[in-house]
Image: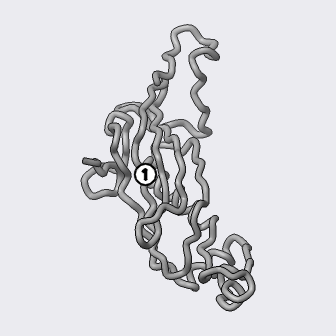
Amino acid sequence: MTRITGPRDGTAPDRLDFEDVALGDAPRALVKGPLTTMHLMRWSASVENFHRIHYDRSFAVEHDMLPDLLINGALKQQFLFELLKTWAGPTGWVWKVNFQFRRMNIVGDTLTTWGRVTALHSSRDFGLVDLDIGITGDGGQESTPGRAVLALPYRGGAPVPYPFVPPVPEAQQVCTGCSPIVT
């Protein structure tokens, strides 16, 4: 059974520590929608993406032969980062994110952004959490699969520092006594 954990889920404090996370844990899903033409147009205006496939239905369907208006890829990307940053909380750090747009999502869809912990690693100053991430649309079909790595503070430790300095793998460490990244 997947355990839903982390800040702002009604059961945990606003700080998520590395020790609070276990394999298989999941941030509370982020659900957005149903997304309307107004949502798409507002996003398009905010990022200055005025491609007509996001707001001009007749152009999208008749000219580009699409099923309907497309939800902006950058908007889906923002949903992934919102999920991760919310879960990491104010003391954690989103280090790496990669994803692929594999399926179109169209106006009227409700998108569910999800994550699941797949590995945990210790470094000297903070822990690293690997996650599978993605977005499913109506019907539960995956449209945007990916992976992410978060840095979380140790319980009782300092927040992950800003600017974030990634840990150095054991073979590249120059200081004596530094704790290696455990995989």
Q: Residue at x 53, y 83 (%)?
A: 36
Q: Position of residue 144 (x, y in %)?
A: 54, 59
Q: Along the horizontal axis of the image, is 156 left or right of 108?
A: left
Q: Position of residue 3 (x, y in %)?
A: 28, 48
Look at label 1 and name its amino acid: Gly
Q: How many other residues sit within 10 Å of disc 1, few (<14), some (14-19) or many (≥20)?
A: many
Q: Position of residue 142 (x, y in %)?
A: 48, 61
Colour mode? one colour
Residue 42 visible to an observer of this rendering = no
Mark 1 highlights which residue? 115
Q: Residue at x 58, y 43 (%)?
A: 96
Residue 125 visible to an observer of this rendering = yes
Q: Residue at x 40, y 42 (%)?
A: 117
Q: Position of residue 118 (x, y in %)?
A: 42, 39
Q: Nearer the viewer, residue 2 or 17?
A: 2
Q: Residue at x 52, y 41 (%)?
A: 149
| SS at badge 1 | strand
Q: Residue furthest front?
A: 65
Q: Along the horizontal axis of the image, is 73 left or right of 88?
A: right
Q: Residue furthest bottom?
A: 58
Q: Quadrant of residue 127?
A: top left
Q: Is residue 138 above or below residue 13?
A: below
Q: Nearer the viewer, residue 63 or 110?
A: 63
Q: Is residue 73 above or below residue 55?
A: above
Q: Nearer the viewer, residue 8 or 75?
A: 75
